[in-house]
């Protein structure tokens, strides 16, 4: 039996949030224990820390946060895995989970006992909390891609926001017939796998995937060839800006911000940049958004980025740390932050918040657009060798976009062979 605390209820009601599903364990069995948290530097996590007094009052557990800038986070986590014992809860990015498998302890029974609704997390985020069939972390921070567009240019061209990639091509050509702007800005150049993030949505939409059930590459299948040909065709159809063959993500973003492109698929957190008068020529009224287009007849997808929080193997206060995770991942806490008028945090990883009417009213429907894509998105399986795999894949895509390679099948076959050698 658990004891509900009035402090949590009061905190949950501050911004119209629902009452927390999380309840403190009856009897405060972990009173006096301290949970040390290692988190990547993030205003979202700082907003959680600002509310942690309610958790501490309810449980008697002290929580101490340490923050590390993103460029240093992987090293800090690796040090904790090797040395151990300093932190009880850690934040880990999806691409690092497998290589840090020895850092985190299974938390399934403890999370189940707290009644956490794992079904409220989209599968594309939740998959990164599972390792070898065990729950080792819960999503707390997650990003999706949306299609941003110039609402004024689409309206002037007489087209609606595209729902499929073919509609995107039609809209791009219509816009280009009546304006100097390119139809869509896309990244094709090499930098940290950025040119894969749209390509993979096409790959999934065509019915393909990166790897098969046996772990071998299958992106060089007919579906993969079709997806790659489609992606490269946007250069050949001249609906992207000149020079796009070497564009990285920021080049595409800059093209949109400068009014040189009418559409842009990119992470949802970039929205604030697109209408920032110090960074952009665009006004909020000019920028619209929708879920990423789908391949005709296929479900929507979106490439995702996920941060999970887990309990460390070397923690001496695992039960208290798991109690903290239950509070940290309650959807009511996330909703408070989303609706706090003093904050501008948009990140949500609970479907209940992504589809929440008040959340969408505040953010113009952006979260529903994300939910539309996440409802059928599966996400990527990242293994130990993902950085090397991504480099091989992004090199293949870049070479095809630049014209250095012209045979799509041959380029993908070579990439598959090279990746199979390191899997």
Image (spheres, grey):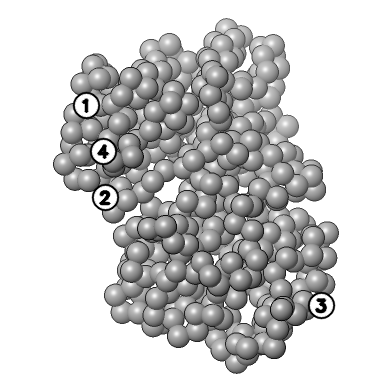
x, y percent for residue 183: 53, 18
CB atoms of marks 3 and 4 within 8 Å: no
Quick one: label 4, few (<14), some, or many (20+) residues within 10 Å? some
Identity of the residue drawn at 66% across and 75% down: 52
In primary-sequence order, the first of circles 2 and 4 is 4
Give the class, few, some or many, for how many residues have Cα within 10 Å of label 1's Cα (few <14, many ≥20): some
| Residue tagged 2 | 385
Q: Nearer the viewer, mark 3 or mark 4?
A: 4
Question: Which residue is farthest top?
Answer: 177
Quadrant, the N terminus: bottom right
Q: Quadrant of residue 105?
A: bottom left
Q: CA distance from mark 3 to mark 4?
A: 53 Å
- Give the mark, 3 or 2, whose residue is nearer the N terminus: 3
3 or 4: tag closer to the N-terminus:
3
Write down the residue under mark 1: 413
Residue 6 disc label? 3
Q: Is residue 149 left or right of residue 313?
A: right
Dot label at residue 216: 4
Q: Position of residue 194 (x, y in %)?
A: 39, 38
């Amino acid at each position: 039996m658990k004891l509900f605390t009035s402090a949590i209820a009061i905190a949950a009601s501050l911004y119209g949030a629902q009452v927390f599903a999380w309840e403190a364990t009856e009897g405060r069995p972990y009173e006096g224990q301290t949970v040390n948290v290692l988190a990547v530097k993030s205003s979202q996590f700082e907003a959680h820390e600002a509310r942690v007094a309610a958790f501490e009052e309810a449980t008697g557990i002290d929580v101490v946060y340490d923050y590390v800038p993103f460029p240093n986070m992987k090293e800090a986590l690796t040090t904790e895995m090797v040395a151990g014992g300093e932190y009880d809860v850690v934040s880990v990015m999806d691409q690092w989970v497998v290589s840090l498998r020895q850092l985190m302890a299974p938390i399934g029974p403890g999370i189940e006992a707290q009644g956490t609704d794992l079904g409220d997390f989209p599968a594309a985020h939740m998959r990164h909390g599972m390792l070898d069939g065990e729950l080792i972390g819960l999503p707390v921070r997650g990003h999706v891609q949306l299609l941003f567009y110039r609402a004024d240019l689409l309206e002037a061209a007489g087209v609606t926001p595209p729902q499929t990639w073919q509609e995107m091509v039609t809209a791009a050509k219509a816009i280009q017939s009546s304006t100097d702007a390119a139809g869509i800005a896309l990244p094709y150049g090499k930098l940290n796998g950025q040119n894969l993030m749209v390509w993979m949505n096409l790959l999934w939409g065509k019915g393909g995937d990166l790897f098969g059930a046996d772990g071998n590459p299958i992106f060089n299948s007919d579906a993969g060839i079709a997806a790659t040909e489609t992606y490269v065709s946007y250069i050949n159809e001249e609906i992207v800006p000149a020079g796009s063959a070497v564009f990285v993500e920021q080049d595409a973003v800059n093209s949109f911000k400068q009014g040189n492109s009418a559409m842009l698929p990119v992470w949802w957190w970039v929205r604030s940049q697109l209408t920032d008068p110090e960074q952009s020529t665009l006004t909020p009224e000019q920028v619209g958004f929708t879920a990423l287009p789908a391949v005709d007849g296929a479900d929507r997808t979106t490439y995702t980025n996920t941060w999970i929080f887990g309990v460390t193997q070397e923690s001496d206060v695992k039960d208290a740390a798991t109690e903290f995770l239950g509070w940290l991942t309650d959807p009511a806490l996330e909703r408070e932050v989303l609706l706090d008028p003093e904050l501008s945090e948009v990140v949500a990883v609970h479907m209940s918040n992504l589809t929440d009417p008040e959340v969408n009213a505040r953010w113009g429907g952006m979260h529903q657009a994300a939910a539309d894509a996440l409802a059928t998105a599966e996400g990527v399986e990242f293994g130990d060798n993902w950085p090397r795999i991504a480099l091989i894949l992004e090199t293949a895509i870049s070479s095809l976009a630049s014209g250095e390679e012209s045979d799509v099948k041959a380029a993908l076959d070579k990439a598959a062979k090279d990746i199979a050698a390191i899997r």
